[in-house]
Amino acid sequence: MTEQMYQLISIIVYMAAMLFIGWYAFKRTSNLTDYMLGGRSLGPAVTALSAGASDMSGWLLMGLPGAIYLSGLGEAWLAIGLTVGAYLNWLFVAPRLRVYTQVSNNSITIPSFLENRLKDTSRLLRVASGIIILSFFTFYVSSGMVAGGKFFQSSFGLEYHTGLIIVSVVVLAYTLFGGFLAVSYTDFIQGLIMFLALILVPSFGIFITGGFSETAASIREVDPSLFNFVSGVSVVGIISSLAWGLGYFGQPHIIVRFMAISSVKETKSARRIGIGWMLLSLIGAIATALIGVAYFQQNGADLADPETVFIVLGQIIFHPLIAGIMLAAVLAAIMSTISSQLIVTSSALIEDLYKAVFKTDASDSRYVFLGRLAVLLVTIVAMVLAWPNKESVLKLVSFAWAGFGGAFGPIILLSLYWRKLTAKGALYGMIAGAITVGVWGNVKFLSSSLYEIVPGFAICLLVAVVVSKATYKHNPIIEKEFDETMELLEEEK
C-alpha cells in the first residue's frame, strides 16, 4: 500500500467520524435552543476544547509554525497576545455572559442578548448586529474553504476545486443536521486531534535532531536571532500582535460557547482546560517550527513552503497511517472553524434578522428548518466566494477578527460591567467600530502601521460611552436584571 493511500485512509476515517457525530447530535436536537445553543448542556471539557478549536483554525498548525520557521521567536508575540486575551475572556466574560444571557429573556445569540439586555424596542441593534455577523462571517467561512481546497491540493495532489467541494460538503452535512451540538462535539474531537499532533511531532522530532543542545546549536548555525523575541520587530509591531488578544471579547463563534455551558460553576474548570490546551498547543507549534529549522539544516535540505513544516515533519517521523492523522489534525483545524462560523451565521440570519424583520411566531420545528436552510445558503455563497482562489486566507481572517473585535468587543464588556450602557450607545459604538476597522484595514498606509483592531476597539468604546452618557435614562427592569445577575454570580461562587 502506498504512503499516500495510508494517509487517505486516515482522512476518510476522520471524516466518517465527523459525519457520525453529526448524526448523533441530530438525534438529540428537537428545538431551536438545541439547534442554536445545544440546550445549554455543554460540559467544561467540551466547552473549552470546542472554543479553542473553533478559534485557532489552520493558523495554529500552518500559519504560526511557518512564521516561526522563517523569522524566529519575534513572531511569537501574536501567540502571547492571543493567550492573554483568551484567559481574560474566560475570566471576565464567560461567567457573566452565561448568567446574564439566561436572566435576560434566555437569549440564545449575541444580538438577541444585546437587544434584551438594553431593552431596545426599535430592533435596530439586533438587526445591525446580525448584519455585521452575516457580513464578516460569510467571508470568514470562505477563507476556511479556501484553506480546505489548498489542503487537499498540496497533500494529495487533488484539484483545488475538488478539495473545496469535499470540505464544504462534509462540514455542511454535520453542521446542517446536527446544529450547535454537532459543531461542539466535532470541535472537541478536532481539538484533541490537534493537541495530540502538536505534542507528538516535537516530542519525537527532538530525538531525530539529536536532543535539546544539538538542536539549539543547529538553529543558531542557521540564524542566532531566531531565538530573539525582539529581533526585527518594532514596538508598534509588538503592539499590533498583542492587540489580537482584544479580538476575543467580540468573537461570536467563541463567546457563544460561554452561553452554552451547563452552569456558571463549570466556567472555572473550562477556563483551566481551555488555557492549558492553548498554552501546550502553542508551545508545540513553536517547538515544531524550531525543530524543523534544525532538521533541515542538519540534512542540508530546503523546505519549499515554510507553512508545511508541521506536515512534512509528521510524514518524516511517523508511519504513513500516523502521518495521515497529522494531516487530519490540519483538516480538523480548518473544519472546526468553518462549522462554528456557519452555525453562528445561521443563527444571525434566522434568530436576529428573519425574526426581527418579519416578526413571525412560527413553531420551533419551522425555525430549525429555516436554520438548516440558512446553513445551506451561507455555505453556497461562501463556496462561490472561495471558488476563484484569489484572496489571501490570512488577510481575510485578520480583517474579520478585527471587525468582530472592534465592533462587538467593547459592547460585550460594557453590557456585562456597566449599568448605564444604552441601546443607542451600543448601536452607534458598534457601527463606529465596524466602519473604523473597514476603513483602516483597507488603507495600506494605516493597516501596515497598526493593526486595525486597535483603532476600531478604541473608537467603539469611546462612542459607546459618550452616547450612553448622553442618552441614559433610568430603567428599573434593566437595573433589576443587572442586580439579579450579580446575585446569581455570587451564589454560584
Image (cartoon, grey):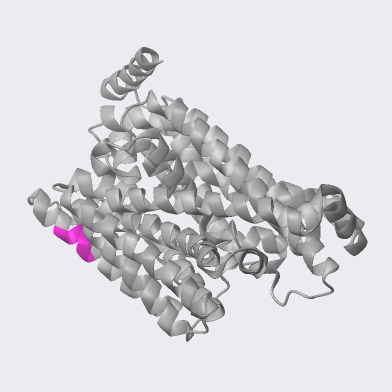
Residue at horizontal 62 percent and vertical 60 percent from the top: 440
Q: In this view, does 423 lie to the left or right of 329?
A: left
Q: Where is residue 117 in the image (x, y as percent from the top left)?
A: 32, 33
Q: Position of residue 164 (x, y in %)?
A: 42, 77
For the C terminus, give its image quadrant.
Answer: top left
For residue 372: magenta? yes
Q: Of residues 78 and 291, which is closer to you in this image?
A: 291
Can residue 131 be seen in this snapshot?
yes
Query: The magenta stretch spans which residues?
Result: 369-373
Q: Of residues 124 and 190, which is closer to you in this image?
A: 190
Q: Of residues 164 and 406, which is closer to you in this image?
A: 164
Residue at horizontal 75 percent and vertical 54 percent from the top: 207
Q: Is residue 428 left or right of residue 68?
A: left
Q: Of residues 440 and 366, which is closer to you in this image?
A: 366
**Location of residue 191 with respect to 117 vertically, above or below:** below
SS assignment for the magenta stretch, majority = helix
Q: Which residue lies furthest to the front in this view?
A: 1
Residue 34, by quadrant, is top left
Can residue 428 be seen in this snapshot?
no
**Location of residue 197 with respect to 11 vertically, above or below:** above
Residue at horizontal 35 percent and vertical 31 percent from the top: 98
**Location of residue 43 with respect to 395 vertically, above or below:** above
Q: How many marks?
A: 0
Q: Where is residue 185 in the image (x, y as percent from the top left)?
A: 34, 49
Q: Position of residue 211 (x, y in %)?
A: 80, 51
Residue 373, by quadrant, is bottom left
